[in-house]
């Protein structure tokens, strides 16, 4: 376990240095960017080690894995759990029970289902709109032209708080250009929803480009945790 902690700590330091350099180049304060460590396929023990190393935000993609893992965390009170995977309507009720943030809201049906589910837990949930930055379907996301309408639906929901937007750079695309487009969408939404200030963009391979285009949250997994692990 001590070897794993050392490895995670070393990788985390490298990523934090990359973020510091990227924010300096962009003329931004490093505190303006939040690191969300994506822990899918890795055990709760790794999350506990990351929390001990100072990580306070984790991201999960798979509902069945995430729910069980979050229940095992020794310091759940110190962790903000972001659900960042595509969300199916039949999983909404379960996700609403453990997630603090859902970054992948991309259609009206999910907005209404989340609002009802969170209401049953008598709390509020922070959400981001996932915006599609590519032409082909399959990775989820609302098209930019429909994002404002979806933002208004979230804004009208009783138990949801709109925090901003999220996107994944298209495979084989130019990340900086894609993130610039996301920033335009974010600016348009913020005009009517001034508290929607988050831009979740950038992963292990393109976090610098995301920071340059105003990302406030980076979703980094492989660069910190390594290649995919088996949960057995």
Image (cartoon, rainbow, N blue to C red):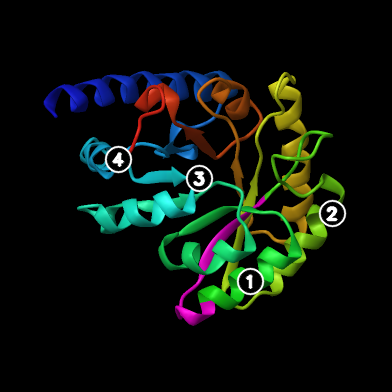
The residue shown at (46%, 25%) is: 19
Say which element carries label 2: helix
**CA separation in Å, label 3 and label 2:** 24 Å
Disc on res. 61 = 3
Q: Nearer the viewer, mark 3 or mark 2?
A: 3
In this picture, is 79 found above or below 152? above
Q: Nearer the viewer, mark 2 or mark 1?
A: 1
**CA separation in Å, label 3 and label 1:** 18 Å
Q: Which residue is mark 2?
A: 146
Say which element carries label 1: helix
Q: Which residue is mark 4?
A: 43
**CA separation in Å, label 1 and label 4:** 29 Å
Local packing at callout 1 (Cα closer than 10 Å; few below 14, some 14-19, many 20+) is some
**CA separation in Å, label 2 and label 1:** 19 Å
Say which element carries label 4: loop
Q: Which residue is mark 1?
A: 113
- Could you tell which of marks 4 and 3 lies nearer the N-terminus? 4
Q: Work out whether residue 21 or residue 226 is closer to the camera in this orientation and state it.
A: 226
Local packing at callout 3 (Cα closer than 10 Å; few below 14, some 14-19, many 20+) is some
Local packing at callout 4 (Cα closer than 10 Å; few below 14, some 14-19, many 20+) is many
The quadrant the N terminus occupies is top left
């Amino acid at each position: 376990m001590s070897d794993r902690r050392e490895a995670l700590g070393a990788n985390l330091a490298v990523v934090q240095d990359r973020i510091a350099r990227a924010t300096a180049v962009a003329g931004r304060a490093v505190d303006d960017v939040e690191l969300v460590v994506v822990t899918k396929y890795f055990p709760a023990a790794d999350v506990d080690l990351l929390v001990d190393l100072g990580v306070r935000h984790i991201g999960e993609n798979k509902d069945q894995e995430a729910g069980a893992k979050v229940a095992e965390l020794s310091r759940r009170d110190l962790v903000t759990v972001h659900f960042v995977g595509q969300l199916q309507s039949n999983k909404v009720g379960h996700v609403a029970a453990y997630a603090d943030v859902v970054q992948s809201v991309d259609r009206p049906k999910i907005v209404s289902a989340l609002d009802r589910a969170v209401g049953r837990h008598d709390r509020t949930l922070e959400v981001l709109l996932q915006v599609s930055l590519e032409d082909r379907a399959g990775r989820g996301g609302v098209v930019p032209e429909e994002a404002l309408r979806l933002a208004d639906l979230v804004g009208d929901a009783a138990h949801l708080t709109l925090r901003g937007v999220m996107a994944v750079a298209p495979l084989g695309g130019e990340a900086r250009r894609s993130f610039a487009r996301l920033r335009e969408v974010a600016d348009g939404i913020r005009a009517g929803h001034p508290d929607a200030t988050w831009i979740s963009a950038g992963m292990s391979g393109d976090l610098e480009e995301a920071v340059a285009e105003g990302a406030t949250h980076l979703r980094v997994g492989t660069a910190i945790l390594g290649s995919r692990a088996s949960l057995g």
